[in-house]
Amino acid sequence: MLTRRDMLRATAAGATVLAVPGLVPAADKKGFTLPKLPYGYDALEPVIDTETMTIHHTKHHQAYVDNLNKALGAAPDWLGKPIEEVVANYKKLPEAVQTAVRNNGGGHLNHTWFWNWMAKPGTGGEPKGDLAKALDDSFGGLDGFKKAFTAAATGRFGSGWAWLVVGGKDGKPLAITSSPNQDNPITDGKTAVLGIDVWEHAYYLKYKNARPKYVEAWFGVINWDTVADLYAKAKKG
């Protein structure tokens, strides 16, 4: 189980944003680094193939880290900040590097979270307790969540992400959103407790253009234990 000490808080748009605990390497003024996966490259088979995981982590994620460090060479003080804070407040950077930091900082943060929102098939638990109740209250249950989440993930035009965030309309505890490219809900002061990468590099080798099949299969590798712990921490603020 996650401890309160594990939770990193960053302020965005006046809100307290809870980052995925213990998942992002500590800030270092020398620059950001590629985090290790919490499992082997073959661990998510057959849902996500070994080759995709290897390329996704060592090539795509590494490129986001490298390009982020390069962009922040123009604002070296930001290299020592938590990546959540960088992404949440990128508009405070010099205008010339804002786009690069938005894209690559978001890429680093999103992927670091993404790896840890997944687990070997059959090991990620299931929604329970307060999280299960929140899914019931917000979507009518797990099936309703899957239907709405699939619609957001498959309906996102081009590249991007679908998210499960804390706080919905009419006082509902959870909501589903999507964002383009590597944008992250933290920029708008929202707390994401789950997200799926729907860039083609996340699934094309195995699923080709069949994004719906990828999304459907992906539900089988969600680390619901982590999601439940994140939701519990978010409720405590």
Image (cartoon, rainbow, N blue to C red):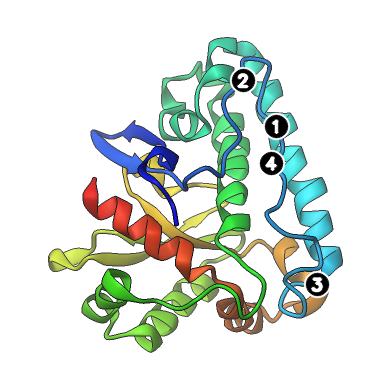
Q: Secondary structure at mark 2?
A: loop
Q: Looking at the picture, tell me which residue is in the foreground, 147 or 4.
A: 4
Q: Looking at the picture, tell me which residue is in the foreground, 116 or 148.
A: 116
- Report the number of discs: 4
Badge 1 amino acid = Thr
Q: Secondary structure at mark 3?
A: loop
Q: Do the residues bearing badges 2 and 3 touch, measured as CB atoms within 8 Å?
A: no
Q: Which mark is residue 33?
A: 1
Identify the residue under disc 2: 28
Q: Secondary structure at mark 1?
A: loop
Mark 3–mark 4 distance (CA, rounded to whole Å):
20 Å
Mark 4–mark 1 distance (CA, rounded to whole Å):
6 Å
* Mark before the other along the chain sequence, 2 or 1: 2
* Residue 5 location, quadrant: top left
**Residues packed near mark 1 inside 10 Å, few (<14), some (14 to 19) or many (20 plus):** some
Mark 2–mark 1 distance (CA, rounded to whole Å):
9 Å
Identify the residue under disc 4: 35
